[in-house]
Image: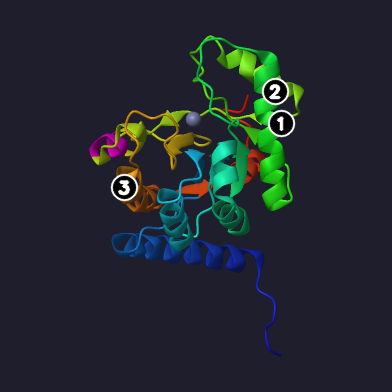
Amino acid sequence: MEKVFTTHNQQNKRLKQNKIMLMKHRNILKRFVPIPEQSKSYVSLTFDDGPDRKYTPKILDILKGFKVKASFFLVGKRAEKYPDIVRRIFEEGHDIGNHTYSHPISPIFKHRIIEREIKVTDKIIEGITGYRPRFFRPTWSRWHINYKKMLNTAKGLDYLSVSWSISSIDWLGTEKLIKHRVLNRDINHGDIILFHDGAEKALFPKREATVRVLPEILRTLHKRNILTFKLSELLEKQDRSLA
Ligand SMILES: [Zn+2]
């Protein structure tokens, strides 16, 4: 009679042998192909102050090439001016956030005015995409006296305000600086990286450096096993850096 069952000892011996074989195999493979680590980091790329007629389509092309979804915080009056670009951002599956109508940076804060800025932008984006945005990004940085006030206004309108943990300082327009700020550091799980596709009230209105450096940034992040997701996906994975 053919033996169909192995004894417990035989089974253990075989498992042990398989394990040794697998380890040897992994070591050989390691020399040629990096074995992906179990723990991957998830980060989010965000683009502010657009849409821009020239730079937003270029950024969308790059993201499409890398099959990456990002988040765009749109300025209402620019969205009004370039509805086709807003539609493209939406149709290509990126998140769209509200970044006020006129990008106010005045030191005088008026709750009523900011509320109107957000509501008008809401209507514009919803009119183009059919959806009310869920995320809001203040026009002041978190160190500004008005930041909290703006956050509260957005909260009153059921918005989830999203800051950033890494600023590329791409508005200065130098590739070297962007690479240094984004790649020359430890990137942690849940980091939210800030870029600009538009140039609302910027001292340096060109975004050429952002466009030129983006492919290298994406390649490097992916090589480091850091995966990029849009905010709504990142939110499902964790809730860090969200106010
Ligand atoms: Zn802005």
User: Local crowd at mark 1 within 10 Å, few (<14), some, or many (≥20)?
Assistant: some
Amino acid at circle 3: Val
Q: What percent of the width, then of the height, locates residue 32?
A: 30, 64
Residue 119 is tagged as 1
Q: Is residue 52 above or below residue 11?
A: above
User: Local crowd at mark 2 within 10 Å, few (<14), some, or many (≥20)?
Assistant: some
| Visual colour scheme | rainbow
Residue 98 in the figure: left or right of residue 42? right
Q: What percent of the width, then of the height, locates residue 163?
A: 54, 27
In front here: 167 or 237? 167
Residue 107 is tagged as none
Residue 115 is tagged as 2
Magenta segment main secondary structure = helix
Residue 213 is tagged as 3
Q: Which quarter of the image is occupied by the C terminus?
A: top right
Q: Are marks 3 and 1 in contact (CB under 8 Å)?
A: no
In front here: 221 or 144? 144
Element class at badge 1: helix
Q: Residue at x 49, y 34 (%)?
A: 191
Q: Is residue 36 above or below residue 148?
A: below
Part of the protein shown in magenta: 176-180
Mark 2 vs 3, N-terminal side:
2
Q: What percent of the width, then of the height, locates residue 174?
A: 26, 37
Q: Is disc 1's CB within 8 Å of ligand 1?
A: no
Q: Are marks 1 and 2 in contact (CB under 8 Å)?
A: yes
Q: Residue at x 62, y 53 (%)?
A: 90
- Single out the mark in the foreground, 3 or 1: 1
Element class at badge 3: helix
**Spatial separation of the CA atoms under disc 1 and disc 2:** 6 Å
Q: Residue at x 66, y 19 (%)?
A: 113
Amino acid at circle 1: Lys
